[in-house]
Image: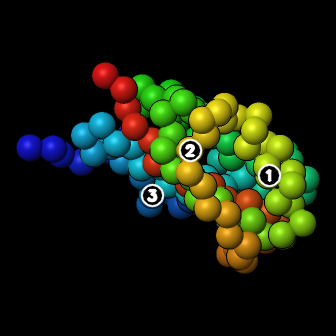
Amino acid sequence: MTAREIVGELPVGGTEPLISSAVRWGDLLFLSGRAPIDTTTMKVVSTDFTEQGRNVLDQIMASLAEAGSGPEHVLRVQCYLLNADDFGAWNELWAEYFAAPRPVRTTIVTGFTIPGMLIEVEATAGIPG
């Protein structure tokens, strides 16, 4: 029987993490949305979109590695942008972090509950082996 395995936790400003960083189910890994938040100060890391995007993607790469996966095993990515004007910069980051053949992706323009956030990204990956 396959069991749900928690892979890390995300601090969200309280004393107890309320969100699992990732959940493993068999050979699948589901990552929570990653926000450009400094976990020490709980503040947005920058006002620059590219810096926020790089921070979020670096968090995702670290979570993948922790679970024994990597960018080549990412199956699906959902990205949320505050501004449609950042779509081109998002595509540049995407091409930098994910080699062909790239995972499927959805990008949505939306609002955020944390002021200053410009991007949030979640991903689903396979775990080889």
Give whichever of discs 3 and 2 has the lower sequence position. 3
The residue that appears at 86% across and 51% down in the rendered structure is 89
What is the distance, in whole Å, between disc 2 and disc 1 at their CAs?
15 Å
What SS does tag 1 mark? helix
What SS does tag 3 mark? strand
The residue that appears at 54% across and 30% down in the rendered structure is 72
Q: Which residue is labeled 1 in the image?
A: 90
Which of the two marks, 3 or 2, is nearer to us in this view? Answer: 2
> Which image quarter is the C terminus in?
top left
**Is 16 left or right of 98, judged from the image as shown?**
left
Which residue is nearer to you in this view: 100 or 15?
100
Which residue is nearer to you in this view: 59 or 11?
59
What is the distance, in whole Å, between disc 3 and disc 2 at their CAs?
24 Å
Q: Which mark is residue 1?
A: none
Question: Residue 62, percent across and down?
Answer: 57, 32
Check disc 1: other Cα within 10 Å, few if <14, some if 14-19, many if 20+: many
Depicted 1 relative to depicted 69: above or below: below
**For the residues bearing labels 2 and 1, Cβ distance under 8 angstroms:** no
Quarter location, residue 119 = bottom right
What SS does tag 2 mark? loop
Q: Is residue 15 visible?
A: yes
Q: Is residue 10 visible?
A: no
Q: Which residue is labeled 3 in the image?
A: 19
Q: Which residue is labeled 2 in the image?
A: 103
Question: Residue 34, percent across and down?
Answer: 61, 53
> Which image quarter is the N terminus in?
top left
Q: Amino acid at mark 1?
A: Trp
Quarter location, residue 109 = bottom right
Q: Amino acid at mark 2?
A: Pro
For this orientation, the residue located farthest to the top is 129
Q: Amino acid at mark 3?
A: Ile
